[in-house]
Image (cartoon, coloured by chain):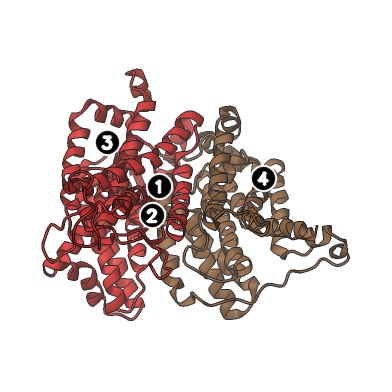
């Protein structure tokens, strides 16, 4: 009989080993799945873990997809550290795409943009064109924060469960996007496709590496990681946030407001996800379509846990999840397997991580059948006394 | 007149998966386990049920397959949460994320296939009553089964000895343990049965309600069912009531459209989700309702040794 024995103290070492262990089990599971599907497991794994690293272009795609994951996961880490269960990053991402995209579209429609794409020119551009892309990003961050503010407000004012509210708002955000691209924002010259005009080039995020799609948003995300690390480890507000999550009673005793923690965590998280959404439309997509929701917000939940809610950990976990995303796309063309393979592996990774995390707090002991029963009986009586 | 009757019938059908899943989750929560994986369990059960019904041509086989798939998913959750003491929130989330991906993965080959429409079984004699007949007596047997289940659940929880023990486990696992009840085994059974019921709910959607498979078919109903248990303040009869209310809201979009109300369909499609939020707010603003009825140890792990 295997049995779990509580450790006197959580194992620090295990909390870093456990994600690696979970990854190893995920790879094992993936190999078994490939064999079960009649594919060569080595070829299958190569699609996920080697191909995305082969050459500049694949690596740039890896970083491109890791960017929104990093941003969303950072924001979620703030929430989870404060014990606030925001799981609606996908909706906040979509709202960021809507508000950021809306501003980009407005700039485009008012012909305030560049000389290259528009057939006729407005004589006076509105402000320096170099600011358009930052304004789009800012609008996205505000939109995401606004969507998260609804969650914070309902929780603060009416004590409504943030898990369910934030999740319901994902579906609402998707319908809102659908409404806009099927309705008022639809491109009249778009052959009746539900999509907006392509945004003017002046609103695009500049490309970071020529001949790739990697844009400046990646740099913004890296800066966000650093800023977030400083915020958590050095700032008073960051400290309050963590105490509120770890020991609510102690936080109350110290006079830290749980309300301000709630608002800080959710606004931060929403702004990050919204920023990621705006980057997606001002970066690679360059228009609004109903298909902007690619699950970054949900994958970021996994990234957040696998990265141990730590900014540096999140960088690595986001790269890993991005690898899985690209691997899923490749496995469709190379192996003829559905793209959804990505989310199977992502989900399995989180499952296995949670299972491995047991080792942080418990020690696995092998006890012989009889000895085990005896020990169990001892524990039972101890439990009864407690 | 006749249209209203059809609308009532549609609302009852649309509320049925919520009744089934809501009652399953209620059972879980009464035992002190919060399973946020309902959406994932329903999705996997929906594709399993659809595939089974498609290949055998029997809706009943679909329901059995759905229940088995739901219970299987719940078993994984239960093992992690109850025996390995993982965080219930995170594990439930993992179950939902995994189920969403897994159902999409295995369901690819089923997209675009369609089952024969399930002809509603008219109850003899009663179905011929004008208005009442079409509204209440020409529905799929599972609709009535769900109603009966609410009664059974109420009896089980509040009138049977096992139900009493189950509630004790949810209120105070330490006390139940001290009295000699196998807390973890009871919780695991509750999780399995709850998963099976979520499974039947998922299969109802893909086999009877739709009846087809598309990715993300469940569309948040698993989460709505979770909200429903809070809305019902953990009372079976109120789960029934709440589910039909939501069914009614879902059907309202079609009613409004056919009445010629000029609202874009996408905004109407938001209604069930907005209604869930509104209901959550209304119910949560009164902390007494929640606190009095919520199982005291809901979401908290229990380890007899420590």
Marks 1/2: CA–CA distance: 41 Å
Q: Which residue is mark 2?
A: A1
Colour representing chain A: red
Identify the image quadrant of residue A258: top left
Give me the residue at 32% from left, 32% from top: A264
The answer to whether marks 4 and 2 mark residues whose Cβ atoms lie closer than 8 Å is no
Question: Which residue, as the protein is rendered here, is positioned at the far front?
Answer: A123
Of tags 2 and 3, which is closer to the observer?
A: 3
Task: Tell which subunit mark 3 falls on.
Answer: A
User: Residue A237 location, x and y as percent?
Assistant: 26, 27
Marks 4/3: CA–CA distance: 42 Å
Give me the residue at 82% from left, 65% from top: B123
Of tags 1 and 3, which is closer to the observer?
A: 1
Q: Which residue is mark 3?
A: A9
Q: Which residue is mark 4?
A: B236
User: Secondary structure beneath disc 1?
Assistant: loop
Task: Tell which subunit mark 2 falls on.
Answer: A
What is the quadrant of the N terminus of chain B in the image? bottom right
Give me the residue at 69% from left, 59% from top: B10
- Are marks 1 and 3 in one subunit? yes
Would you say residue A361 is visible in this rendering? no
């Amino acid at each position: 009989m295997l049995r779990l024995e509580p450790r006197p103290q959580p194992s620090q070492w295990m909390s870093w080993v456990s994600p690696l262990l979970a990854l190893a089990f995920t790879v094992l599971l993936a190999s078994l799945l490939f064999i079960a599907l009649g594919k060569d497991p080595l070829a299958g794994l190569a699609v996920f873990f080697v191909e995305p690293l082969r050459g500049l272009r694949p690596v740039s795609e890896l970083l491109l997809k890791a960017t929104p994951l990093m941003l969303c996961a950072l924001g979620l880490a703030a929430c989870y550290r404060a014990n606030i269960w925001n799981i609606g990053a996908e909706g906040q991402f979509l709202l960021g795409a809507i508000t950021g995209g809306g501003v980009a579209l407005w700039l485009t429609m008012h012909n305030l943009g560049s000389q290259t794409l528009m057939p006729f020119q407005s004589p006076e551009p509105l402000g320096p064109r170099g600011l358009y892309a930052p304004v789009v990003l800012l609008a996205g961050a505000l939109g995401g924060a606004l969507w998260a503010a609804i969650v914070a407000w309902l929780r603060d004012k009416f004590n409504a469960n943030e898990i369910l509210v934030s999740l319901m708002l994902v579906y609402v955000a998707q319908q809102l996007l659908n409404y806009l691209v099927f309705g008022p924002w639809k491109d009249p010259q778009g052959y009746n496709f539900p999509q907006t005009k392509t945004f003017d080039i002046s609103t695009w995020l500049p490309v970071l590496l020529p001949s790739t799609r990697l844009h400046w948003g990646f740099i913004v995300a890296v800066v966000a990681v650093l800023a977030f690390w400083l915020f958590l480890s050095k700032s008073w507000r960051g400290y309050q946030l963590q105490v509120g999550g770890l020991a609510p009673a102690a936080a109350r005793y110290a006079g830290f407001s749980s309300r301000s923690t709630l608002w800080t965590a959710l606004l931060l998280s929403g702004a990050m996800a919204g920023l990621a959404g705006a980057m997606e439309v001002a970066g690679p997509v360059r228009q609004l379509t109903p298909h902007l929701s690619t699950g970054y917000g949900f994958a970021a939940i996994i990234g957040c846990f696998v990265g141990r809610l730590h900014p540096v950990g999140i960088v690595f976990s986001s790269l890993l999840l991005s690898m899985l995303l690209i691997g899923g796309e490749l496995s469709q063309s190379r192996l003829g397997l559905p793209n959804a393979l990505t989310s199977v592996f992502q989900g399995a990774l989180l499952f296995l991580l949670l299972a491995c995390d047991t080792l942080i707090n418990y020690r696995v002991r092998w006890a012989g059948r009889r000895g085990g029963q005896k020990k169990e009986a001892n524990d039972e009586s101890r439990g009864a006394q407690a | 007149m006749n249209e209203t009757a059809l609308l009532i019938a549609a609302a009852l059908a649309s509320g049925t998966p919520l009744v089934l899943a809501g009652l399953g989750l209620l059972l879980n929560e009464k035992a002190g386990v919060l399973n946020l994986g309902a959406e994932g369990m329903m999705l996997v059960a929906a594709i399993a049920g659809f595939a089974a019904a498609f290949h055998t041509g029997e809706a009943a086989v679909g329901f059995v397959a759905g229940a088995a798939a739901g219970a299987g998913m719940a078993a994984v959750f239960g093992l992690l949460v109850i025996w390995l003491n993982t965080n219930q929130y995170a594990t439930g989330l993992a179950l939902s994320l995994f189920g969403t991906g897994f159902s999409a993965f295995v369901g690819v080959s089923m997209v675009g296939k369609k089952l024969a429409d399930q002809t509603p079984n008219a109850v003899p004699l009663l179905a011929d009553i004008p208005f009442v007949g079409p509204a209440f007596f020409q529905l799929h047997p599972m609709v009535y089964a769900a109603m009966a289940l609410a009664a059974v659940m109420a009896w089980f929880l509040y009138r049977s000895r096992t139900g009493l023990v189950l509630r004790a486990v949810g209120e105070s696992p330490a006390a139940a343990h001290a009295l000699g009840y196998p807390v973890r085994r009871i919780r695991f059974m509750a999780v399995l049965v709850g998963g099976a019921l979520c499974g039947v709910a998922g299969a109802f959607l893909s086999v009877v309600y739709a009846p087809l498979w598309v990715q993300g078919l469940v569309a948040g109903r698993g989460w709505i069912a979770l909200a429903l248990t809070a809305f019902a303040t953990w009372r079976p009869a109120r789960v029934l009531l709440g589910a039909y209310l939501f069914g009614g809201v879902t059907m309202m979009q079609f009613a409004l459209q056919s009445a010629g109300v000029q609202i874009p369909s996408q905004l109407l499609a938001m209604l069930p989700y907005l209604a869930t939020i509104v209901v959550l707010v209304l119910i949560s603003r009164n902390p007494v309702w929640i606190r009095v009825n919520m199982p005291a140890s809901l979401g908290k792990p229990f380890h007899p040794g420590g």
